[in-house]
Image: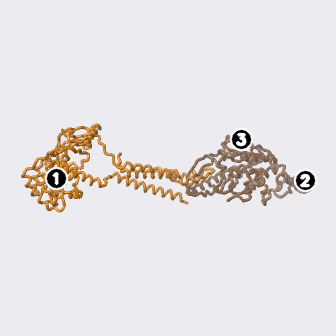
Chain colours: A orange, B brown
Amino acid sequence: MSFLLPLGLLFALAIVVPVIIHLLDPDKGKHIYLGSLQFLLKAKQTQQPNYRIQQWWLLLLRCLMIVLMALLLAQWLLPAVKSSQSYVLVPGDWPQHFSTQQQNQYTELLSEGATLIRKDVSGAELMATLAQLPAASSQHVFVRNSAAMVPEFRVAGRDNIFWHIAEQYRGPADAANWLILASGTTQSLANLMAQKLQTLPKLQVDVQLYSTTRSETHNYDMLINLSGQPLQESHFSLLNASAQIFSHAEQPQVHSLVAGFNDDGLPITLRQFFSGQIHHLFHPELLTKLDSWPEQPWFAASLLALYHNAGREGAIAANQVSEQLQRSQSGHPVKQPWQELLLLALLLVWLGERLLSFKLNKQRLAE
Amino acid sequence: MALPEELLALLQYDDLEFISRTIAEGYLSGHHPSVRKGVGTDFNQYKVYQQGDEAAKIDWKLFARSDKYFVREAERESERSIHFILDSSASMNFISQSQGALSKFNYGKYLIGALAYLAQKQGDPFSLTLINNNGLDITATGSGRAHWYRVLNALQQHNSTGAFPGTHWQSHLSGLVSKACMVVFISDCYQSGTEISDCLSLLKHQKNDVLLLHLHSLEELQFDYRGFIKFEDLETGEIRKVNASSVKTRFLAEQQAWLQQLASHCDQRAINLQRLSVDNDFSEAITQFLQQRTRQGR
């Protein structure tokens, strides 16, 4: 059990208030001695329900109310599902590039009984490796840079994967694949992504897939190179042509995200991007637009991965952006369905308490 | 309903002898037509024969002298003793909430004091038994003023505690009342089982008369309580917290059933049951006593 504000639990101490109220029974004063209770006992057999028991129910409800309030205040977080198995995946040159904190985390995981997989894989190969692991297990993946965090995993909602990105790595991106995204509406993009996820190994098809689909639809606009290797000139001509399409786009679309915007507010062409100019062309306005994009999570991840690719200066810029991103995200309320359930329960308990209290009061005042 | 003021003033003295005597004499001097003339040795022993008197009781010697019919009474009556039995169980401690109220037990004490005074005046032998499950406190049969003081002393010293005893103690009573006599049983008639009913059955036989003075309080009879009240049983100490207003109807129904049951029980055994409210003065009780005495004489 974990709490966002453990101090809020102190509110539970307020339980003494209803208990004291219960003990200071307002009707305590009236005490009458009768010669015999026999008629009363016979009469009471039909009278229901029992006043004293109702009083206890009332106390219980009141205490429950306070406990719920305390839990709400402390922002009880759902206990993380501890799966029976956990895996730790580290690159071959572990622990190079990783900070001490990350290394500590690694040892801690192993001491908790996690299975160690030491493998120098990235991109689609990494995904294939992870896909072989049981779906219910939690997977801690230590990668050299965020480029290895293949965006599709985020899209598919695979939240059992915990990424640990090396903090001190400044080399080329780990991903050895071409990642090709299609343009068109965001809807069609999502469909394509879904298809790709179904056929994971096919992700390596890369440029060829790009070319064929391009010729079919004449509508492709985006190409991300995560390999760190320069593109060939033949690719650029295609990309340049498509870049012209979204330079006119009024609203930023998914397909234009790769390039971002330059100082003049124009989309940065892929050619500019791959020629290594991007890191100083990154415009702060982009950040404000991030929120309005439904594909924001994986977009941000992709973007950061690209920045990593742009060399040391780009990595520094990426860190700044990621910090800003985190700051802007922490401002948002953390969505917790648990809290809503608690609130609902509190409401129900409160209603019950009112009802019972009203009933008892009515009985007390009854002639 | 409260006791009359003069009685309240009297009760302040807390002197059993004084109170009992004043009650009895106050009754006698008051205009109570039911007091029978010629009762007791202090009165004329001869009474002019009236229609309805038994012819066998006419004093023929006197008739021979005076040529008038006279009836002798006092000789015969003095043979019959009066046994007072006071229930001294804890439930008799019931006292109503109103100002200056008497507990049932105290009411019974004063009543016996006054009745014994009357009996003593008439020369009737009388005894007193206080009964609860601690045992019987019997003041043996006797007569005269000194005996009256003994009875008062026993009354004075006794408290009401415990419950009404079972048949074990009751069996001691049967010897006491075996002869022709008058039994005055004063109780609130609250019983956990059938002990009081059993006791009444035991007391009553062919030759004697039993007068059951059933003490009750208007407060109990009307059950005019309101709201949530903790009721405690004086005998068992059991506590029940109930909404008095909501159980009132049922309570009264149960009580009525009980009263009827008691009445039919007494009816079957020819026991004279008289209900007395401790909120009233003693005149009703004394009247009942004297009437019973008269009836028994015939």
The tally of labels here is 3
Dot 2 falls on a residue whose secondary structure is helix
Q: Secondary structure at mark 1?
A: helix
Left or right of A193, for residue B264: right
The Cα atoms of the two marked residues, 2 and 1, are separated by 152 Å
Viewer-side residue, A71 vs A289 = A289
Mark sitting earlier along the chain (3/2) = 2
Where is mark 1, residue-wise? A279
Q: CA distance from mark 3 to mark 2?
A: 44 Å
> Decide: marks 1, 3 in contact (CB < 8 A)?
no
Relative placement, left or right, of B221 versus A18 is right
Residue A47: x and y in percent read 53, 54
User: Residue at label 2?
Assistant: B62
Instruction: Check disc 3 and give the amino acid type.
Output: His
- The mark lying in front, picked from 3 and 2, is 3
Specify few, some or many for label 2: CA neighbours under 10 Å numbering under 14, 14-19, or 20 or more: some
Q: Sort mark 3 into few (<14), some (14-19) or many (20+) by Cα contacts within 10 Å.
A: few
The answer to whether residue B277 is seen in the rendering is no
Chain bearing mark 1? A
The reply to whether label 2 and label 1 mark residues of one chain is: no
Q: Of B81 and A306, which appears nearest the observer?
A: A306
Q: Amino acid at mark 2?
A: Leu
- What is the distance, in whole Å, between disc 1 and disc 3 at their CAs? 116 Å
Position of residue A351 in the picture relative to residue B190 (left or right): left
Disc 1 residue type (three-letter): His
Looking at the image, the residue that sits furthest to the left is: A234
**Relative to the observer, which residue lies in front, B79 or A321?**
A321
> Residue lying furthest right in this view?
B65
